[in-house]
Image (spheres, grey):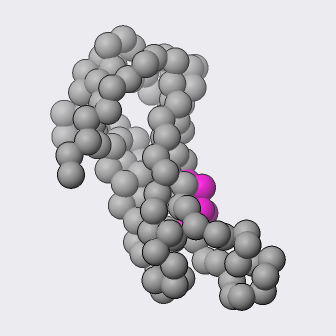
Amino acid sequence: MKFELKQTINRKENFTISATQQGNRLGRERLKTGTFEPTPIKIILKNSGRIVARCYARNFNNFLEVDDIDLEPGMYEIDIEPVWNPCAETDSDYKVLCIDLFCKEKVTFYVEV
C-alpha cells in the first residue's frame, strides 16, 4: 500500500500506522469456546525502497508510531506482513486486518491488489 506526503511531518506530530486483527476475539474468550492467540504482524514503512521505520508486535492491535524522525514529502510504502498462526486458521475473520493511518495531513492511499 502506498501513499504520498505533500508536506513534512515533524517528529513531534502524531504519525501512526495501525494493523488491527479482526474477528470475534472477545466473544470467543467470554464463551469459553477456546482462547484467542494474536497473530504476530510486522509493519514496515519505506521511502524510495529505504526502511524508515518498522515494528514487530504480537497483539491483536499492532501499531507503528514514527516519533524519532521527520517524514519528508514524497511517496511512501507500507508493508504489512502477518505471520498467521494456528489460531488464525480457526476463523476466516481472524485473517482480516483493518489498516489505519493517523497523521495531521490528508493522504491518498494507492492500493495494489
Q: Position of residue 25 (x, y in %)?
A: 66, 70
Q: Is residue 46 above or below residue 42?
A: above
Q: Is residue 70 above or below residue 97?
A: above
Number of labelled discs? 0
* Left or right of 34 in this view: 46: left
In the picture, which quadrant includes the N terminus?
Answer: top left
Is residue 55 visible in the rendered image? The answer is: no
Q: Residue furthest top?
A: 7
Q: Position of residue 36 (x, y in %)?
A: 64, 78
Question: Which residue is pictured at 44% across the width and 69% down the height?
Answer: 95
* Left or right of 79 in this view: 24: right
Question: Which residue is pictured at 46% across the width and 57% down the height?
Answer: 97
Question: Which residue is pictured at 70% across the width and 78% down the height?
Answer: 28
Is residue 73 visible in the rendered image? The answer is: yes
Q: Is residue 99 above or below residue 27?
A: above
Q: Nearer the viewer, residue 11 or 103?
A: 103
Q: Is residue 113 magenta?
A: no
Q: Nearer the viewer, residue 82 or 95?
A: 95
Q: Nearer the viewer, residue 14 or 51?
A: 14
Q: Position of residue 8 (x, y in %)?
A: 39, 14
* Left or right of 14 in this view: 101: left
- Give the main secondary structure, helix, strand or loop, of the magenta stretch: loop
Q: Position of residue 4 (x, y in %)?
A: 29, 24
Q: Is residue 59 magenta?
A: yes
Q: Nearer the viewer, residue 4 or 54?
A: 4
Question: Which residue is pictured at 50% across the width and 69% down the height?
Answer: 93
The residue range painted magenta reads 58-62
